[in-house]
Amino acid sequence: EPVVRKELHNMPDESVFIYCLVGDRAYWKDPNNEFRKNLKLTGVPTLLKYGTVSHSLYAVDLHAFKWETDRSL
């Protein structure tokens, strides 16, 4: 979270940042968790980007992602 928040000032002006808690570990690990079912998330924290041109949803599991200075996410 601190890494993401530190970079928020680099977002385009029309961007919207939404911070969403997914519950405690037991709730998150439940295979019927709405985040797992609807958004197909596999890990937390996850950074999502919804592209306005392609209307695509991209998910990045931040535990598996090596953060660098690439802001193309």
Image (cartoon, rainbow, N blue to C red):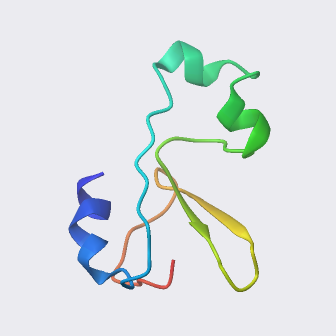
Q: Quadrant of residue 51?
A: bottom right
Q: Return the residue nearer the eye: 72 or 56.
A: 56
Q: Residue at x 30, y 82 (%)?
A: 10
Q: Return the residue nearer the eye: 44 or 14.
A: 14
Q: Is residue 46 left or right of residue 33?
A: left
Q: Residue at x 40, y 48 (%)?
A: 19
From this view, report whether residue 30 is shown above or below residue 63.
above
**In x, y percent, where is residue 32?**
76, 21
**In x, y percent, where is residue 29?**
62, 21
Q: Quadrant of residue 14?
A: bottom left
Q: Kindly give the residue lying farthest to the top in the view shown.
A: 26
Q: Is residue 49 left or right of residue 42?
A: left
**In x, y percent, where is residue 53?**
71, 86
From this view, report whether residue 57 is shown above or below residue 71.
above
Q: Kindly give the residue lying farthest to the front in the view shown.
A: 14
Q: Is residue 1 left or right of residue 59?
A: left
From this view, report whether residue 53 is shown above or below residue 32.
below
Q: Quadrant of residue 9?
A: bottom left
Q: Residue at x 44, y 34 (%)?
A: 21
Q: Residue at x 57, y 17 (%)?
A: 27
From this view, report whether residue 13 is shown above or below residue 21.
below
